[in-house]
Image (cartoon, rainbow, N blue to C red):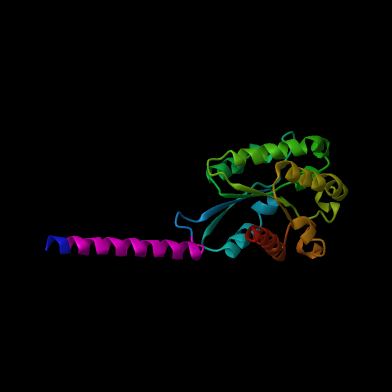
Amino acid sequence: MKKKMKLAVFGIVIMITVLGAAFFVQTVGNGKNPSGPIRVACVGDSITEGYEYPNDLGALLGVNYTVGNFGAGGTTVSLSAQTPYMNQTAFEEAKQFQPKIVIIMLGANDASPENEKYISNFVGDYLKLINAFQALSSKPQVWIVAPPPVFHNGTGLSTEFYDENVIPSIEQVAKEANLPVVDVYSAFASHSDYLWDGVHPSGEGSKLIAQEIFDALTSK
């Protein structure tokens, strides 16, 4: 009798183990994340803070991701400028978020006339920003975004300086840090109408930014 009871208990244990393993395989196979949604931090200036691209990206990524908007308007990569991103509350909040993915889209404000003189420090300062995120305990993947073009100087930003100095510097940062670049800059080449003032995205522009980032993330 005791032997039969032991065999029955053993059979139940085996069944629970098999069902548990099946549930685990099904969960992974369905792309679900048992430990909670993957946290994505969108880091940037006003193109991030005041517009819908992080929300659009969240909609594309779905329920397995939580996308946080950590943009801070008017900020720069340059630490010598008046409003560096690394000096902002948004930067501290982004780190406290403990993201698994960090999307950095900065550089437009570094093309303003008062900030052009700091371009020689741009690469080094950008690498400091990247290192600060890579040092987090969450060990996030960092993605660099080449921001949309500056289509005219009406916003006070220099189109020529941006094209000839900032964008190449962003590419240099990616090369030195061995990180992928999401080329939003080129995606807007035939969509100047998606930037309502030549710099900031319309609704369609925000969707385009989100789609480019989504395609880059999911291609990996």
Q: Quadrant of the C terminus?
A: bottom right
The relative height of residue 166 versus residue 18 in the rendered view (above or below) is: above
Viewer-proximal residue, 108 or 32?
32
- In the rendered picture of this protein, how many numbered marks are placed on residues? 0
Residue displayed at 80% across by 39% down: 115
Identify the main secondary structure in magenta: helix
| The stretch drawn in magenta includes residue 123 | no
The answer to whether 146 appears left or right of 6 in the picture is right
Q: Nearer the viewer, residue 180 or 136?
A: 180
Q: Quadrant of residue 128?
A: top right
Q: Quadrant of the N terminus?
A: bottom left
Point 21% across, 63% down: residue: 7
Residue 153's spot in the image, x, y percent? 85, 51
Residue pushed farthest front? 3
Q: Position of residue 33 (x, y in %)?
A: 48, 58
Please give the name of the residue rendered at 74% of the width and 41% of the height, measured from the top-left corner.
176
Residue 196 appears in the rendering? no
Q: Does the magenta stretch include residue 23?
A: yes
* Coordinates of residue 216 in the picture (x, y in percent): 67, 58
Residue at (24, 61) in percent of width and height? 10
Q: In this view, does 69 lie to the left or right of 184?
A: left
**Highlighted range, magenta:** 5-32
The image position of residue 119, as x and y in percent, is 81, 38
Of all residues shown, which one is farthest toward the top?
80
Q: In this picture, is 27 found above or below 164?
A: below
Q: Is residue 145 visible?
A: yes
